Image (cartoon, rainbow, N blue to C red):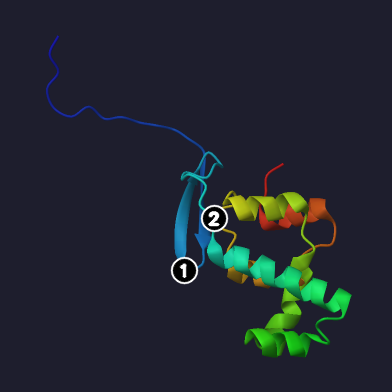
Amino acid sequence: MKLTGDIPLCLIKPMTIRRRGQEMKMVIGGQNPQAAKPDPVLIKLVAKAHVLRKGLESGSIASIKDFGRAYGIDHADAKRMLPLAYPAPDIVKSILTGNQPEDLTALRLKNGYTLPILWSEQRAYLGFTP
């Protein structure tokens, strides 16, 4: 039997549309459609938060203002960065390996004041699936 013409094809998969900064991404089946790709901006943000925390704990950084001045960061931005030094270890690992949720951006993560203290709540808030 010989077929001629186009044959319509219908594929049904669960999907969501997620905002990632200025762009919209279609996430099919709740999975990241691309291979893991570390986001250098996210990694740098988490790393700076850890430097801030360690510096304040050890006394090598006298204040958040001093940290801001040393890294060329506004005092308010440096202050918002501190909660980012306390995410669940698996969240940090996901960010370092590029396996974070598609819509997790540095801008969203910078909103650290709303980051829950409990790791289970952090995962839910940032969109990590169990």
Identify whether 99 is placed above or below 66.
above
Q: What residue do we see at 81% from left, 71% from top?
A: 54
In depth, the one of 103 and 60 nearer the eye is 60
Where is residue 19 shown, x and y percent of the image? 52, 61
For disc 2, the neighbor class at 10 Å (few under 14, some 14 to 19, many from 20) is some
What amino acid is at disc 1?
Answer: Gln
Quick check: can you spot residue 100?
Answer: no
Counting other residues with Cα less than 10 Å from the Cα at mark 1, is it few (<14), some (14-19), or many (20 or more)?
Answer: few
Residue 27 vs 49, above or below: the answer is above
The N terminus sits in image quarter: top left
- Name the residue: 61% across, 63% down: 43
Residue drawn 52% across the image and 45% down it: 32
Per the image, the residue denoted by label 2 is: 38
Q: Secondary structure at mark 1?
A: loop
CA separation in Å, label 2 and label 1 = 18 Å
Residue under label 1: 22
The percent position of residue 90, horizontal first and vertical second, equals: 73, 49
Q: Earlier in the sequence, mark 2 or mark 1?
A: 1
* SS type, badge 2: loop
**69 vs 16: above or below:** below
Up-down: is 74 above or below 122?
below
Q: Nearer the viewer, mark 2 or mark 1?
A: 2
Q: Residue at x 22, y 27 (%)?
A: 7
Q: Is residue 127 visible?
A: yes
> Any mark on residue 68, and which?
none
